[in-house]
Amino acid sequence: MADPALSLASQPEGSTAVLVLADGSVAWGRGFGAVGEAVGEVCFNTAMTGYQEVMTDPSYASQIVTFTFPHIGNVGTNAEDMESHGVPGAVGCVVREDVTAPANFRAQGTFQEWMERQGRIGIAGVDTRALTRRIRLSGAPNAVIAHNPDGKFDLEALLEKARAWQGLEGLDLARVVSREAREEWQGSVWHLGQGYTRPEGTGRPHVVAMDFGAKDNIFRNLVKAGADVTVVPAQTSFDDIMALKPAGVFLSNGPGDPAATGAYAVPVIQKLLAADVPIFGICLGHQMLGLAAGAKTTKMNQGHRGANHPVMRNADGVVEITSMNHGFAVDNTPGSLPENVIETHVSLFDGSNCGIAIVGKKAFGVQYHPEASPGPQDSFYLFEKFVSMLG
C-alpha cells in the first residue's frame, strides 16, 4: 500500500520536481541540478557525509538515491572527491532540505551546479523518512525523477515510464560502466595538502583488476597496501588476463544483477580459480566469486547502503563498521552455500552474507566496501591480507 505522505493528489504551489513511483505514489518537491527526467530504482543511503562519492559510485548506475541525512550539499563539491569519471552513476537524488551554500574549505563549487554539470537530477523538500519507510516495507521501487523549472509535468506519461522499466533484476550494467581500455593505475590514497600520493619502492606484486564499475579508491588502497595495479575492462578474457602475468586478480564492485554480469565473468573467474590465482572480490566481485564457486545470489528487499553498517567477522567475533552499497547478496540461507565456500562475515542488521572464502584456494570476497569513500576505514586490513598472499 502506498504511504499517504507520498500520495499527494494535487501539485503544491512552487514545486518544480516530482518523483513518480511505479505503484502510482507521487512525491513533489523543488528541483535542482539537471533539467529533464530519468528512470531508475529508488534506494536509500544512511551516510551523513560523502554525497559526492556516493553520486559518482558506478554501483549506483540506474538508481535514484534517497539520502536519509537531511542536510545534503552543505560542504559543496571538489575535483578530488570523484569516485569515477565519465561513467554513469546515480541518475538522481532525493533530499529533505534545500541545498545551502557550501561551508567547507575544500569546496570548489556548489552541489547544485555540480549536479547540473553531471547531468543528474535532484529533488528537495521530500519527506525522506516516509520514502525510506516505503522502501523498507515494500522494497525498492522503480520510479521516474523529473525536474522542470516551469513546474509542468505529464504524470501519466511519467507513471507509464516507471512501470515500463525492467528494473535491475536480470540487468547487466557492468559492461556499461566498465573501462573500455586497459589502464596502468597511478596514485595512492588522498592526504590533506598532498592530494593523491604516488607509490614508493620497486618489486611490488602486480594485481590485475577487473573493472565491473569500480570506485577509484579501491585501486588507491591496493597501491597503499603495496601492489602495482593494472585495470582491465569487465569482459577481458582469461588468456588476456594471464598474459599480463598477474600475481593476483581483483574483482571490483559494480551495478546490476551479478547473475547477468556473471554470464561472461563467471567462466573467467572459474578458470582463475582452477589456475590457483589469488583472488579478492568486493561487492559485485564478491557475488560473482560466489557464483563461480557454486553459490547463488538473490535480490534483496531494500538492500544495504550507507557508511554505518555493522558486520561481524565469524572467525573471532570482531565487529567492523563498514560502508555498503548493494541490492543483491550471496544466498546464505541454511544449506545454500556449497561445501567449498566458507562464510567469513555476516551483517548484524539482518544476518545476510558479507564475506566468503573458497576452500583450498587463495580466494576471498566481502560484500561491503573496505575502501570506504565515504565511510569508516575499519577494514583496510583486507587489502593488506590480499597483497600478503601475492608473494
Image (cartoon, rainbow, N blue to C red):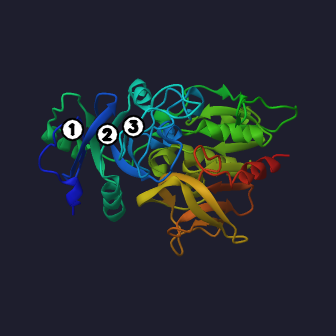
Near mark 2 (Cα within 10 A), the count class, few <14, some 14-19 or many ≥20, is many
Q: Is residue 169 left or right of residue 252?
A: left
Separation of disc 1 and disc 2 at Cα? 10 Å
**Residue wearing tag 3:** 99
Above or below — where is 54 with respect to 84? below
- State the SS at label 3: loop
Query: Marks 3 and 2: in contact by CB < 8 Å?
Result: no
Dividing the picture into quarters, in which one does residue 319 lie? Answer: bottom right
Query: Marks 2 and 1: in contact by CB < 8 Å?
Result: no
Q: Is residue 210 left or right of residue 15?
A: right
Query: Marks 1 and 3: in contact by CB < 8 Å?
Result: no
Residue 241 seen in render? yes
Above or below — where is 62 with respect to 318? above
Residue at 72% x, 41% y: name it. 222
How far across and down, in percent of the image, does residue 372 sit?
A: 61, 47
Residue 238 seen in render? no
The amino acid type found where label 1 is placed reads Ser
Look at discs 2 and 3 and give the one toward the viewer: 3
- State the SS at label 1: loop
The amino acid type found where label 3 is placed reads Val
Name the residue nearer the viewer: 74 or 199.
74
The amino acid type found where label 2 is placed reads Ile
Residue at 55% x, 27% y: name it. 180
How far across and down, in percent of the image, does residue 261 sit?
A: 49, 45
Specify the label residue 15 is tagged with. 1
**Residue wearing tag 2:** 123
